[in-house]
Image: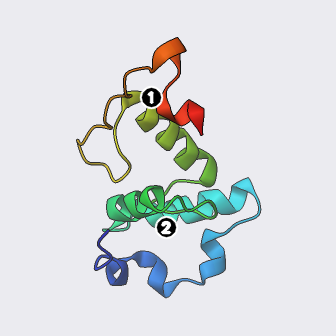
Amino acid sequence: MQTEWMPQGRCREIPPGTFFPSDGVGVEVARRICAECPVKAPCLEYALFHRIDHGVWGGASERERRRILRQRRLDGVLPGGGAERLPPDPPPLRDGLRPADCL
């Protein structure tokens, strides 16, 4: 995943703690900063791709990123925002088991 967008982020001029709030008010403050950031989209994709669990990235809280990932899994879209699709599940083995079930 590319990272050359990072130096263009508005967050580079703001204390990092701003993006790791402990309450909803802090999340809203971070979102407002992200809203005007020129690299909001790649920042969000970076956090999704790397499964970053903490902080506000690309204007999305931890909970919002979990929802995005869940929806992408349901839609079969890989993290990173590309149009690539996940491969189909392998056909079941005998008795309806799949290879992952045998591990």
SS label for mark 1: helix
Quadrant in which the N terminus appears = bottom left
Viewer-closest of 83 and 20: 83
Q: Residue at x 30, y 68 (%)?
A: 38
Residue 100 at x, y percent in the picture: 52, 35
Extreme-left residue of the structure: 83
Q: Give the side of residue 54 with respect to residue 13, left or right.
A: right
Q: Which residue is mark 2?
A: 33
What's the residue at 60%, 63% (across, down)?
A: 29
What percent of the width, then of the height, locates residue 36?
Answer: 38, 64
Q: Answer with the quarter of the image where residue 37 lies.
A: bottom left
Q: Which residue is more in the foreground, 96 or 36?
A: 96
Q: Amino acid at mark 2?
A: Ile
At x 56% / y 62%, what residue is drawn?
52
The structure's colour scheme is rainbow
- Does residue 90 lie above or below 72 as drawn? above
What residue sits right under mark 1 in the picture? Answer: 74
